[in-house]
Structure formats: C-alpha cells, structure tokens
Amino acid sequence: MRHSGTGRSGARGGTMSAGWRSRAGAVLLLAAAVCAPATIDAQWVKHRTPGIPRTAAGTPNLAAPAPRTADGKPDFSGMWITAPANALPCGRGLVECGIELPMSREGGYMGASLPGGLPYQPWAEELVKKNMATSSKDDPHGLCLPDTFLRAYGLPHIVKFVQTPQLLIALEEYNVDYRQIFLDGRALPEDPTHSWKGYSVGRWEGDTLVVDSIGFRDDLWLDFRGSPLTSAGKVRERITRPDFGHLNIDVTVDDPKAYTRPWTVRLQQQIIVDTETIDEVCLENEKFMRRLRGTP
C-alpha cells in the first residue's frame, strides 16, 4: 500500500453515510488517496469487528448505548474519524475521508464555527495570511511531520483509542504516531520539554473525561491555514460518548501568545468499524510537497 502524502488508502467497510461531494482544490489535494487493490485482501481492512451492537440488518447500531468499562466509566476505545457532516467522499469505494474541522468554504479552518473566527493576535493573523497566500507550502502535515492532536481529529485518518483505568492511548494511523493521556492522578510537569504532542493528564467529571495539555512547541499548526499553537498554550478537552457511534470533543484553547482570548470549538468524531488500521507513512516515496514547491 502506498499513500500520496496526506491521503487515505484501502477499500474499507466503514459505517459512514454519503457526505460532501466536492471541495476546494487545495483541500482535495490534501485528501487525495491512491489505491492499491492487489494488497487490500492481504490486510485487515475488511475484518468484521466482533462484539459490537448491530441492527437486524447486521450494520453497526450507532445509536446504541455507549459501552462502559468494568468500573462504570464510559469506554472511548475504538477507531474514530471525523464525523460525516464534515466528511468528504474519497471515491473508489473508500469510506468517506474527513477534512479539517469545522467545515469552511475557505479551506480547513478551526474557527469556522465561531462568530468572527479565531481571535488572533496581530502577528498570528499576519502569519495565517502568509500561509494562505503561499498555498501553505510550509504546512507540517504536507511535509510529513507530526500533527497536533487537535488537527488529527479533523483529518482523513483514523485515530484509535485504547483505554485502560490508568491511561488513554491515541494511536494515529497517519505516520504511525501516538499520544498518551495519563489518568493516574499525576500532575502536569512544571517545566515541560516542549514537543509536538505536549503532556496530557485526564480526570473524570461524571461521564465526561476532562483532559488538560501543555508543553507544546512554538511552530505547531491547528488547521490547514496554519492557525498557531505555541509554547504558552493550554488545551482542555471535554470528551463524551453520547452513544455507541459518536464522540463529542469540546476543545478550549487558551494561548495568550497567539490569541487575544480563549476560544472553544466542538470536534465531533464517528466510529469506524469492520476494518483495522494500516501503515500510512507519509515520507515513503513522498513527492507531493516537492511538486508543490516546483522542485524535482
């Protein structure tokens, strides 16, 4: 299986309904997928998921009650992808591919649902204008670098949650990446080493998992426009599972270096079943960004 930079491959079973049928050219490039049909059957992309609620017709029952762990907490385990209201069909029999959330006719933009958009500091607003004017040639995603976990929730790539009483692990199919959310009561570090994913700790408030994260690099992108996240940033996620098939992730970003005030958006996810993650290594024979830059 070969992937073209940012695309998804594989004729997956999926659960998603028909979604958006067109998209701006730049986002279509980022969502493009290359199929290799000869390799599909050799992988678990059509493996029936056992033990999940199904309708009489055998399809996954997305409206069934959310599963719970042995200690009664909601179980977020499963494979997730951007919800269908923000999805883009990839063609060739693929499940729908997500585009960056929330939807915007002007390109993937984290603040599309906010009145007035994201409250950028002046330097951040100029940076975003520069990124858009240069076709986002410096986009870390296009350069095959790790995504921020917030951006990962809106891209056309599976994020698989594995939940234990002490740890929630997010396995990102894109670039075989991962994130750890510690549920063991530890505090966030006082002097973190700034990194792509930062440091994350979670606690339960009833059926809501509240996750606080800090310790980010200064050059991170939250969306296709390059809306920044800096080392001053604090991120809070409030994660709920209202039913079997969906996650609601309410995100608050408090980054006074990049924004004039904190802001909150909802990043919705839908479960994907009857398949499995596969290798999606962006740097393997990657040519998209070199062609975009006009280099050989």
Image (spheres, rainbow, N blue to C red):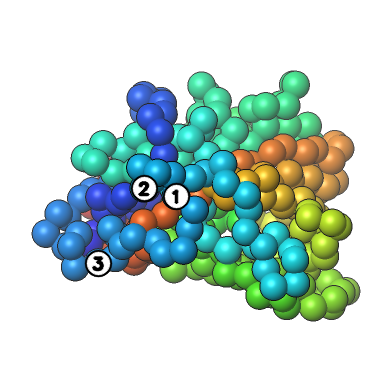
Q: How crowded is mark 3: few (under 14 residues within 10 Å), some or many (20 or more)?
A: some
Task: Name the residue that disc number 3 marks.
Answer: 43
From mark 3 to mark 1, how far is it between C-alphas? 23 Å
Please give the label number shown on residue 58.
2
**Image coordinates for residue 249, horizontal then vertical, percent:** 68, 47
Task: Name the residue that disc number 1 marks.
Answer: 54
Pointer 3 or 2: first along the chain? 3
Q: Which amino acid does label 3 sit on?
A: Gln
Q: In which quarter of the image is residue 111?
A: top right
Judge depth for marks 3 and 2 and give the one in front.
2
**Image coordinates for residue 234, horizontal then vertical, percent:** 81, 55
Pointer 3 or 1: first along the chain? 3
- Residue at 75% in and 21% down: 115
Helix, strand or loop for disc 1: loop
Q: In this view, does 115 lie above or below 85?
A: above
The answer to whether residue 72 shows anywhere in this view is yes
Quadrant containing the N terminus in the rendered view: bottom left
Q: Which amino acid does label 1 sit on?
A: Arg
Q: Is residue 114 above or below residue 77?
A: above
Helix, strand or loop for disc 2: loop
